[in-house]
Amino acid sequence: MALEITDSNFEEKVLNSDKPVLVDFWAEWCGPCRMVGPIIEEVSNEYKDKALVAKLDVDSNQEFAAKYGVRNIPTVLFFKGGELVDRKVGVAPKENYTETLDNLI
């Protein structure tokens, strides 16, 4: 299951991770986010030992959404070594996420 990230633990969990990190920026009311959610959960289960897969609710946690310029949701950001390395905006097939993670591992 994807880890719930908040503004208060973003730095610790995402930026200080020794594994590549995928963060799904989403909101409860967002229809496309509900389409991406099950895909993110599948990726989380498949990559649990190789990468950190997380979700951040932008309604409750706006600091890092603003910092990384998340203006549309769903937006999925990829981090490695504390640096933002890629982003996917909107609904995308699972392969788009797994291919990016594979390149970071």
Image (tube, rainbow, N blue to C red):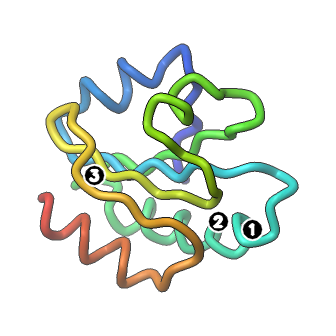
- On screen, residue 90 versus residue 103, left or right, reads right
Q: Are marks 2 and 1 in contact (CB under 8 Å)?
A: yes
Which type of secondary structure does the marked residue at label 2 adopt?
A: helix
Identify the image quadrant of residue 43.
bottom left
Q: Name the residue that disc number 1 marks.
A: 34
- Quadrant into which the C terminus falls: bottom left
Answer few, some or many: residues within 10 Å of disc 1's Cα (few below 14, many 20 plus, some between 14 and 19). some
Q: Nearer the viewer, residue 50 or 94?
A: 94
Instruction: Tell me the element at label 3.
Output: loop
Amino acid type at circle 2 is: Gly
Residue 9 numbered tag: none
Q: Residue at x 38, y 27 (%)?
A: 13
Name the residue located 53 percent from the left edge and 57 percent from the top edge. 75
Q: Amino acid at mark 1?
A: Arg
Label 2 environment density (alpha carbons within 10 Å; few <14, some 14–19, many ≥20): some
Residue that label 2 marks: 37
Mark nearer the viewer, 3 or 2: 2
Name which of mark 1 and mark 3 comes first in the sequence: 1
Question: Furthest-top residue in view?
Answer: 8
In three-dimensional space, the C-alpha distance between marks 2 and 1, rounded to whole angstroms, equals 5 Å
User: How far from the left and from the top, in percent, is residue 68?
Assistant: 43, 37
- Where disc 1 sits, the SS reads helix
Residue 72 spot, x, y in % from top left: 63, 56
Residue sitting at x 75%, y 68%? 34
On the rendered structure, is 8 left or right of 48? right
List the residue tagged with mark 3: 51
